[in-house]
Image (tube, rainbow, N blue to C red):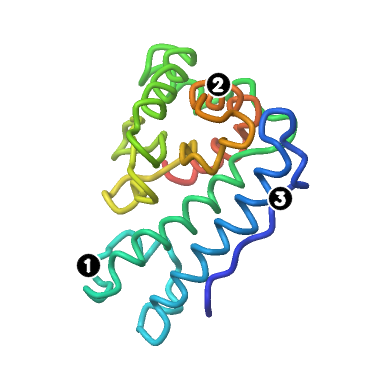
Amino acid sequence: MAYTVPPLPYPYEALEPHIDQLTMEIHHDKHHQAYVDKVNAALDGTPLADTPIEDVLRDLSQVPDDKRTAVKNNGGGHYNHTMFWENMRAGGGGQPGGELASAIDSAFGSFSDFQAKVKETGVNQFGSGWSWLVLDGSSLVIVGSANQDNPISDGKTPLLGVDVWEHAYYLKYQNRRPDYIDAWWNVVNWDKVAERFAAAG
């Protein structure tokens, strides 16, 4: 069954003023839809056409050579954005609790040090890409990825990612990527991130 763009779990305007309604409409309805259309076209007629996208991305060597780049880019775009929408919510932000909070403190020293590292990775990502909190084995680490690459292809489990493609922020923040990342913390859905962390443990 072909992939589809999941509906946003909140209204387009729900993340205002941190992420504006028009950005959410274009980002979700146009950009995400384009990734889905292109990965569906690339996998159409192959044995992978009905395979969950995370399973495809976990082992890109199973994708035919002539389709691998399209699947990596557009399948990655579909997977990354599906996670991105879920990891945000109206009235989000603050800090995680429980085991996730303890793991972040243990790995990075403090929540503020963790935030600084995510921001640094996102700001310094050259061109388009993402800054990720991932589980690498039993360790929490922060990694960057170019374009729509996803850490799942490197054997890591992504828990939280901030999209630093210009289409994610340019209408409101123009070239001020650091300001966008600062604002993005106000919409993070820590309950969802903690759920991912518990499932991966």
Give the label, 2 or 3, closer to the camera. 2
Q: Is residue 8 above or below residue 159?
A: below
Question: SS for tag 1?
Answer: helix
Compare marks 1 and 2 and give the one earlier in the sequence.
Answer: 1
For the residue marked with disc 3, what is the amino acid?
Pro
Residue drawn at (55%, 45%) of the image: 84
Q: Residue furthest bottom?
A: 45
Give the label, 1 or 2, closer to the camera. 2
| x and y, in percent, of residue 75 in the image | 42, 62
Q: Is residue 2 above or below residue 193?
A: below
Compare marks 2 and 3 and give the one earlier in the sequence.
Answer: 3
Q: Is residue 180 above or below residue 196?
A: above
For the residue marked with disc 1, what is the amino acid?
Ser
Q: Which residue is mark 3?
A: 9
Nearest to the observer: residue 17 or residue 45: 17
- Is there any visible trace of residue 165 in the rendered image? yes
Q: Which corner quadrant of the image does residue 66 belong to?
A: bottom left
Pointer 2 local density, CA inside 10 Å: few below 14, some 14–19, many at least 20? some
Q: CA distance from mark 2 to mark 3?
A: 25 Å
Q: CA distance from mark 3 to mark 1?
A: 33 Å
| x and y, in percent, of residue 155 in the image | 28, 49
Q: Which residue is mark 2?
A: 179
Q: Is residue 158 above or below residue 29?
A: above
Compare marks 3 and 1 and give the one earlier in the sequence.
Answer: 3
Residue drawn at (74%, 46%) of the image: 12
Quadrant in which the C terminus is drawn: top left
Nearest to the observer: residue 53 or residue 131: 131
Q: CA distance from mark 1 to mark 2?
A: 38 Å
Q: Is residue 93 left or right of residue 101?
A: right
Residue drawn at (53%, 71%) of the image: 3
Q: Which residue is mark 1?
A: 61
